[in-house]
Structure formats: C-alpha cells, structure tokens
Image (tube, rainbow, N blue to C red):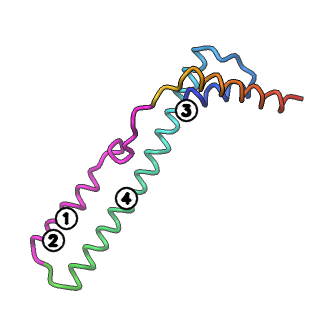
C-alpha cells in the first residue's frame, strides 16, 4: 500500500520514481500511518477504560455485587488497559502488489498527471 502511494505521489509531483525515492516515501507513509493509528487506538483505549470504571462504580454502588464479580470486572478492566497498540490494530502482513497492479497504477497516475499539467 505504501509503495503504491509512493509511486502515485512521485508521479503527481513529476519526480522520477527511483527505488531509493520509493523506499524513502514508503517509509514516511508507513511511519505516518502508524503514528495516526497509535493516537486513535490510545484515545479509544482510554475511553473504554473510562467507561469500564464508570460502569463498575455505578454497578458496585447500586447493588450488592459479590466479590467474584467485582474481581472479574477489575481483571477485565486491567486486561483492556494493558493491551498493546499492535494487539488492538491486528494488521495482517502487507501483501506485495503484482507487477500488473503496479503497472496499472503507474498508467493511471501518468494519465492523471498529464490531465493536471498545464
């Protein structure tokens, strides 16, 4: 995915798509995507923990709850809080595009670039 995006960006900018440039742009795209994912997952995880805490306080205050339930709920809350970003994202290894896919993408990019050029 990052290599395809790198090819498109370089074509749109009218830059030669050397292996070095493609690799450099691909790394930047991957780093940006990971940073964005980490931020989103971190916020979602904090929200889940907040909801679990609020629910446990409300539940424990509103009825008599046995100790096993309270311990189980606390263990579940801790398990969610301890999940790593990689576990939450669960991204499968990226499949490499075929030569045909790359060629089609490059043709589309070149056509689009020629339409934009004055």
Label 4: which residue? Answer: 46
Is 60 situated above or below 116?
A: below
Which element is circle 4 on? Answer: helix
Of all residues, the one furthest to the left in this rendering is 67
Please check the rendered image and state whether residue 91 is part of the magenta-colored stretch, yes or no. Answer: yes
**Image quadrant containing the C terminus:** top right
Residue drawn 77% across the image and 31% down it: 112
| Foreground pick, 103 / 11 | 103
* Crowd tier of the residue under label 1, counting other residues whose Cα lies within 10 Å: few below 14, some 14–19, many 20 or above: some
Residue drawn 64% across the image and 22% down it: 103
* Label 2 – label 3 distance at C-alpha: 44 Å
Q: Which residues are magenta?
A: 66-94
Query: Contact, CB < 8 Å: mark 1 with mark 3?
Result: no
* Crowd tier of the residue under label 2, counting other residues whose Cα lies within 10 Å: few below 14, some 14–19, many 20 or above: some
Query: Contact, CB < 8 Å: mark 2 with mark 1?
Result: yes
Label 3: which residue? Answer: 29
* Label 4 – label 2 distance at C-alpha: 20 Å
Query: Contact, CB < 8 Å: mark 4 with mark 3?
Result: no
Label 2: which residue? Answer: 70
Which element is circle 3 on? Answer: helix
Residue drawn 35% across the image and 41% down it: 86
| Foreground pick, 27 / 5 | 5
* Label 2 – label 1 distance at C-alpha: 6 Å
* Label 1 – label 4 distance at C-alpha: 15 Å
Label 1: which residue? Answer: 74
Mark nearest the camera among 4 and 3 is: 3
78 lies left or right of 26: left
Q: Quadrant of residue 66?
A: bottom left
**Image quadrant containing the N terminus:** top right
* Crowd tier of the residue under label 4, counting other residues whose Cα lies within 10 Å: few below 14, some 14–19, many 20 or above: few
Is 65 situated above or below 21?
A: below
* Label 4 – label 3 distance at C-alpha: 26 Å
């Amino acid at each position: 995915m990052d290599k395809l995006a790198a090819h498109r960006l370089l074509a749109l900018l009218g830059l030669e798509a050397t292996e070095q440039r493609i690799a450099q742009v691909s790394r930047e795209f991957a780093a940006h995507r990971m940073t964005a994912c980490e931020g989103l997952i971190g916020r979602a995880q904090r929200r889940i923990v907040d909801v679990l805490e609020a629910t446990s306080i409300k539940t424990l205050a509103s009825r008599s709850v046995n100790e096993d339930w309270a311990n189980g709920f606390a263990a579940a809350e801790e398990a969610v809080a301890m999940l790593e970003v990689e576990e939450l994202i669960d991204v499968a290894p990226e499949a490499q595009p075929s030569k045909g896919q790359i060629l089609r993408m490059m043709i589309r990019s070149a056509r689009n670039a020629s339409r934009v050029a004055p």
